[in-house]
Image (spheres, rainbow, N blue to C red):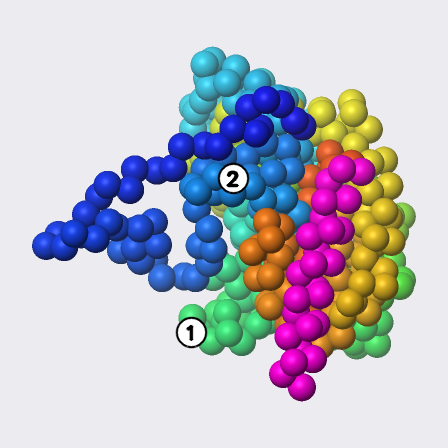
Amino acid sequence: MTSAAASETPAAPDAGTRAPGTGAAITWQDEVSRDLLNLGGRLALFVRGEGSHVWDADGVRYLDFLGGIAVNALGHAHPAFVAAVTSQAATLAHVSNYFATPPQLELAARLKRLAGAGENGHVFFANSGSEANETAIKLARLHGRATGKRTIVSLHGAFHGRTMGSLSLTPKAAYQDPFRPLLPEVVHIAATLEALEDAIDDTVAALFVEPIQGEAGVVPLPDGFLRRARELTSAHGALLVVDEVQTGVGRTGEWFAFQREGIVPDAMTLAKGIAGGFPLGALVTFGDADVFYPGTHNSTFGGNPLATAVGNAVLAEIESSDLLANVTERGAQLRHAVEGLPLVTGTRGSGLLIGITLLSPVAAEVRDAAQRRGLIVNAPTADVIRLAPAYTIGDAEIDEFTTLFAAALDEVATHAKEDA
C-alpha cells in the first residue's frame, strides 16, 4: 500500500523532558528502563505503519518481514482493519461475558465453517494464544476427569505460551526453571513417530502439537506425524489439540495447517493473525469434544464486540481477496529469492512462515545487520532467521527484502572472514 502520506516523515515524540537535576534529555530508552518491566526487547521506537512498512521516531522507514511475529496478516493500517475498528468502536465496544453480540456470533460461525468444525463444534474467545491454550488445557483436564486419563503430552521444541499452564507444555528450561513447580502429569516427547507410538496410551488425556514449531526455528512435524497422532489419540480416547496460534488463519497457505494433512483434530487454538493486530485468541472444538459447563471457564474481555468485529473483517478480507493464493505464491518466491545468498543453507516452513537456515550460529548478527539497513526479521534460534510478512506482499516488497537481506548477509559473512 502506498500513498503520498507514506513518504511523509512522522513527527518525533517530544524529547523535551529533562532528567531531574541535569540538562540531559530523557530518551525513549530511558523511559523503557524506568517504566517497563525488564523483559528484554524494545529494539526501536515505532510511531507509524502502513502496508509492509513502519517508521521509527527519527523518520527511518523499515520493511516489516516479521509482521509482529506472524500477527499483522494484512500489514499495517489496512483499510479493512481501520474501518472495522472505527465502525465498531462507535457502535459497541464491550459488554462482558454475560451477553452475546452479533460480531461474536458471526465470527464463531465463520471459524467453524473455515475449520470444518461441524454442527457440533464450538468456539471460545480469549485475548491471546496463551489464554487459548490455557482453555485447551482445561478442556484436556475435564476430558481426563470424565475418562480417568490424567497425562497431557507435548513435544520437545514446542512453544504454547508463558502463562503457568501453557508454560508447563513449553519444555524450554530457560522459560520453565524460574517458575517451578509447574503443572503435574505433563510429559514431553521428541517430535518423532517412534516417540509418539511409545507415549500415547490409555493414560493420556490429550496430545498438544504445533504443525510447525515457530519458536524452535520454523520446524515442521515429520511426514505423517499428524495423521498418526490422530490415529493413536482416537484409538486411546485422548484429545488431539492442534496449536495453530502461529500457523493458523492462512499463514501457511491453508486456512489451518492441519487441513494439509487431511485430519480433523478435537480442538484447535488460535490467535496472532486472527484479528490482524487486535488482541484476540480462540479455542475451536470439533465434534463432541466440548465438555465445558457453566462456571468451568470464562473471560471478561474474551470475544468482546470490538475484537470480534475486527476478526470478522480480517478473515473476510483474506477470503474475498484470495490472499491464501498470494501466501502460497509469495512464499515460494521468497524461498527462491534467498537461494544461493551468502551463509544461507536452505529454507523450511510453509507459505509465509519461513525459516532461513544459516551456515553458522550468526542469526542474531544477521538480524541486527538487517535492522540497521531498515529490514525487520528475527532470530528464533542461533542459526535460523524467521520471516512472517503480511499476506499482501508483492514483487516490490520481495525485491526490497532481497536487496536488504543480501546486504545484511554480506556484512556478517565479511566480518566472519575477517575474524577467522
Question: What is the C-alpha distance between the residues marked 1 and 2?
Answer: 36 Å
Residue 409 in magenta? yes
- Quick one: label 1, few (<14), some, or many (20+) residues within 10 Å? few
Residue occupying the point 43% across, 62% down: 40
- Can you name the residue that lies furthest to the left here? 21
Q: Depth check: give the residue in front, 418 or 290.
A: 418
Query: Label 2 near label 1: C-beta < 8 Å?
Result: no
Q: Secondary structure at mark 2?
A: strand
Q: Depth check: give the residue in front, 96 or 296.
A: 96
Residue 130 in magenta? no
| Quarter-of-image position of residue 4 | top right
**In the image, is residue 119 above or below residue 179?**
above
- Can you name the residue that lies furthest to the bottom here? 420
- Estimate the x, y position of residue 375 in percent, counting from the top left: 62, 50
Q: Secondary structure at mark 1?
A: helix
- Quick one: label 2, few (<14), some, or many (20+) residues within 10 Å? many
Is residue 349 found left or right of 59 in the rendered image? right
Q: Provide the residue span drawn in magenta.
A: 395-420
Amino acid type of the residue that numbered disc 1 sits on in the rendered structure:
Pro
**In the image, is residue 237 above or below residue 64?**
below
Residue occupying the point 73% across, 58% down: 406
The secondary structure making up most of the magenta span is: helix
Residue occupying the point 41% across, 61% down: 39
- Estimate the x, y position of residue 233 in percent, counting from the top left: 79, 60
Instruction: Determine which residue is flagged by label 1.
Output: 178
Instruction: Determine which residue is flagged by label 2.
Output: 55
Q: Nearer the viewer, mark 1 or mark 2?
A: 2
Question: Can the viewer see residue 136?
Answer: no
- Estimate the x, y position of residue 331 in percent, counting from the top left: 82, 47
Amino acid type of the residue that numbered disc 2 sits on in the rendered structure:
Trp
